[in-house]
Amino acid sequence: MAREKNAKQPFWLGGAAASMAVCFTHPLDQTKYRMQVLRSKESMLHTLYRFAARDGIPSLWSGLSASILRQATYSTARFGLYNSLSRQMQKNGSKPSAASTIACAGVAGGLAGMVGNPAEVVLVRMCADGAKPLAERFGYPNPIVALYRIGRDEGLQVFGRGISANVVRSVLMNVSQIAPYTAAKRVILSRTSLKDDIRTHALASLVAGTVATTACAPADVLKSRIQSAAKGSSVMQVVRDGLRNEGPGFLMKGWTPAWLRLT
């Protein structure tokens, strides 16, 4: 019966659900990317208000089509790869250990990061455009045109820009959600009177979301700055410039909207 139920729920439903979810969370994503590329210390609310007041509330959804493309590639690949790897682990009929589950999540996240990197480049550029002066904007009307123009004007190698930071972020995002969730749930059940119900799951998810957001923030900032630039920059160059001009705190830019979105 369980196999029959699983067979009716293909992995691509995860990608479809993620694509629908971003229709609601996109303003947070957009704000995160703008905070990451801006060399200022504006808060999330101030950034949201400033751009909504200048360009109108609907502008907070600009770049949504790129966000849907990113989820359709990255999230679908992540769910599909994880399911495939998990099935391989369960071939002998035994339940996979926590270590093997984390390993599957890490590998699936890393490979999905590679698959989704071209869409990630487009997404970062389309979301960050509104925070740039008019002369520096890319002005892509949609992600399909963006993919074509990047390939034609800058070369296919640009689709791999920031891929190392993106893969690290994707691995950390998957792994740092599973291990903290499991640990938090174990502590809650052993040290409180709560049962294994929705309240425990929600609290454990809150802990996992906080840990994952914090662990991923530096790689996320580096990825966004590399991908949003018209000219290529190395990870070390971005780190040096950020530390010199803004201090170590620049690695946590966009943490609040990223945390809200994930949590």
Image (cartoon, helix red, strand yellow):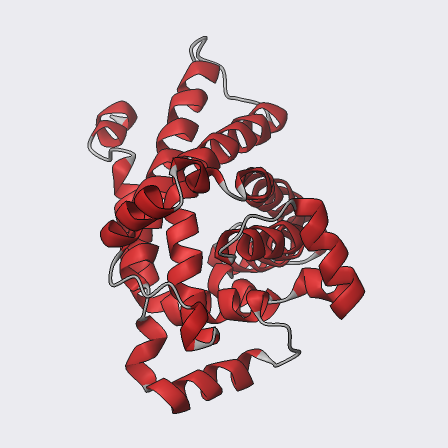
x 53%, y 63%: residue: 258
Q: Nearer the viewer, residue 83 or 97?
A: 83
x 30%, y 50%: residue: 149
In the rendered structure, the answer to whether residue 246 lies left or right of residue 159 reads: right
In the rendered structure, the answer to whether residue 88 lies left or right of residue 202 reads: left
Tell me where residue 87 sits by quadrant.
top left
Instruction: Locate the N terminus by quadrant.
Output: top left
Extreme residue in the top direction: 92
Q: Position of residue 36 (x, y in %)?
A: 58, 65
In the rendered structure, the answer to whether residue 131 lies left or right of residue 38 reads: left
x 43%, y 15%: residue: 88
Q: Position of residue 166 (x, y in %)?
A: 54, 43
Extreme residue in the bottom direction: 53
Q: Position of residue 220 (x, y in %)?
A: 58, 53
x 31%, y 43%: residue: 152
In the image, residue 202 above or below residue 85: below
| Residue 146 visible in rendering | yes
Q: How many numbered markers are drawn?
A: 0
| Residue 71 visible in rendering | no
Tell me where residue 224 sits by quadrant.
bottom right
Q: Position of residue 64 (x, y in %)?
A: 30, 63
In the image, residue 90 above or below residue 107: above
In the rendered structure, the answer to whether residue 162 lies left or right of residue 179 reads: left
Q: Nearer the viewer, residue 186 or 218?
A: 218
